[in-house]
Image (cartoon, rainbow, N blue to C red):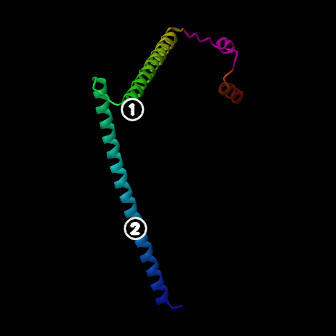
Amino acid sequence: MGIEKIGKKFGAFASVTAKKAGEQAQIARLNLDAAGLEKEIDGVYMAMGRYCYTKAKAGDSMSAEVMEYCADIDSLHMQIASIRKEIAFHKSERDGVAYSTAQEASEMEFEVEPDSAQAEGDVENPQSSENEKSAK
């Protein structure tokens, strides 16, 4: 096979690869666009839900399904409040223990007792014994 034929085949391969890569990039962009729009829809759903919830809490007439959703939301709010209360308890316990431990540590007296052999001068300094040997 000649170099020209190899070059043409390589060029065709590169062209196909570039086209596929371009298509893949376009698909990725379109998927991102669709995901962005879905996120916007979720935002509208949330706004609509908040609207219905505030209307139901204000006493406006709502369907039984909406009232059930409102009761679910109220239950979740109570669970969140309970969890936050427990977090506050654990934080106060943690901070109280940390404070008392630090205070106890600062009040402790540390006595360092010297080694009895070194205090009495019974241990020779290795360098001084070497010096004494060389002097003799």
Q: Is residue 54 positioned above or below 103 on the image?
A: below
Residue type at mark 2 is Glu
SS label for mark 1? helix
- In the rendered image, residue 22, in percent from the top left (x then y), is placed at 39, 68
- In the rendered image, residue 71, in percent from the top left (x then y), is placed at 40, 25
- In the rendered image, residue 89, in percent from the top left (x then y), is placed at 46, 16
Q: Is residue 85 positioned above or below 28 on the image?
A: above
Residue located farthest toward the bottom when viewing the structure as drawn: 2
Q: Residues within 10 Å of mark 1 (few under 14, many from 20)?
A: few
**Res. 1 image quadrant:** bottom right
Structural distance between the alpha carbons of marks 2 and 1: 45 Å
The region drawn magenta spans 109-123
SS label for mark 2? helix
Task: Please tell me whether residue 116 belongs to the stretch shown in magenta.
Answer: yes
Label 2 or label 1, whichever lies nearer to me, is: 1
**Res. 17 image quadrant:** bottom left
Residue type at mark 1 is Glu
Q: Residue beneath label 2, please?
A: 23
**Res. 110 image quadrant:** top right
Q: Residues within 10 Å of mark 2 (few under 14, many from 20)?
A: few
The quadrant of the picture occupied by the C terminus is top right
Q: Nearer the viewer, residue 59 or 14?
A: 59
Q: Nearer the viewer, residue 118 or 10?
A: 10
Instruction: Tell me the tag on residue 12.
Output: none
Q: Residue beneath label 1, please?
A: 65
